[in-house]
Image (tube, rainbow, N blue to C red):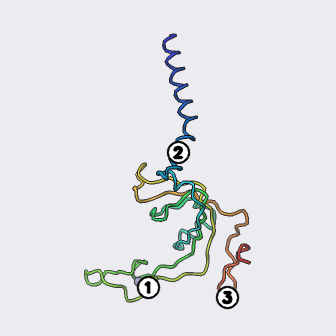
Amino acid sequence: MDEYIREGARKNSALIRKMQGQPEAHATAEAKGGSHQQEVRAHQHHILKCWPEYFEAIGQGRKTFEVRENDRNYQEGDSLELREFEPCKRCDGSGRMWDCGDKMECVQCGPSHGEYTMRWLFCKVSYVMKGGSFGVSPRHVVMGIKLPANHQWPIAVCPNGEVSDPRRA
Ligand SMILES: [Zn+2]
């Protein structure tokens, strides 16, 4: 039994040392410009297209997460500006459509493959789970998102198409 307790205590103290040592190791990696460097960069603002179905769910406060391709190095504390975007009905926003068994350039839409509705939402990234586990592809990221305290729904759209947002007034 004593041996068991000693072994437990040894493991615990090793764990405590490891935990205490972590900030130091982290700082060293940053100083060397290692892989942790990108975690201390200033918070960024990302402007993203958001399809109506998801825009509604986020605005209503039901959808509190975002799954995105991680091509922007999303970090906790970043802000997202989600611009509602109605994709072209023919090509579903891809710019390519099936025609007689071939995938052709969509003739219905312009270079943006859809239209902005002039509504947008702001939110903060409250958590980032990088892909590579739990069935999330390594190229993707799952983010927890939080609406601002002054969020109102439905969003008021001004007659000129501008979104009424107190931070832009
Ligand atoms: Zn199209």
Cα distance in 3D space between marks 2 and 1: 46 Å
Residue 28 got which mark? 2
Residue 160 got which mark? 3
- For this rendering, which residue is in front, 26 or 140? 26
Which residue extends farthest left? 101
- For this rendering, which residue is in front, 61 or 85? 85
Identify the element where label 3 is drawn: loop
Amino acid type at image mark 3 = Asn
* Residue drawn at point x = 55 percent, y = 59 percent: 65
Amino acid type at image mark 2 = Thr
Estimate how packed mark 3 is, as few (under 14), some (14 to 19) or many (20 or more) residues with alpha carbons within 10 Å: few
Q: Earlier in the sequence, mark 1 or mark 3?
A: 1
Q: Nearer the viewer, mark 2 or mark 3?
A: 2
Task: Give the image quarter of residue 43.
Answer: bottom right
Q: Earlier in the sequence, mark 2 or mark 1?
A: 2
- For this rendering, which residue is in front, 26 or 152? 26
Identify whether 117 is placed above or below 15.
below
The quadrant in which the C terminus is found is bottom right
Q: Nearer the viewer, mark 1 or mark 3?
A: 1
> Residue 134 location in percent, x, y?
43, 49
> Residue 95 location in percent, x, y?
39, 81
- For this rendering, which residue is in front, 49 or 13? 13
User: On the picture, is 166 further left or further right than 111?
Assistant: right
Identify whether 28 is placed above or below 73.
above
Q: Nearer the viewer, mark 2 or mark 1?
A: 2
- Which residue in the protein does label 1 denote? 111
> Residue 60 location in percent, x, y?
63, 66
User: On the picture, is 60 further left or further right than 72?
Assistant: right
Callout 2–callout 3 Cβ contact below 8 Å: no
Callout 2–callout 1 Cβ contact below 8 Å: no
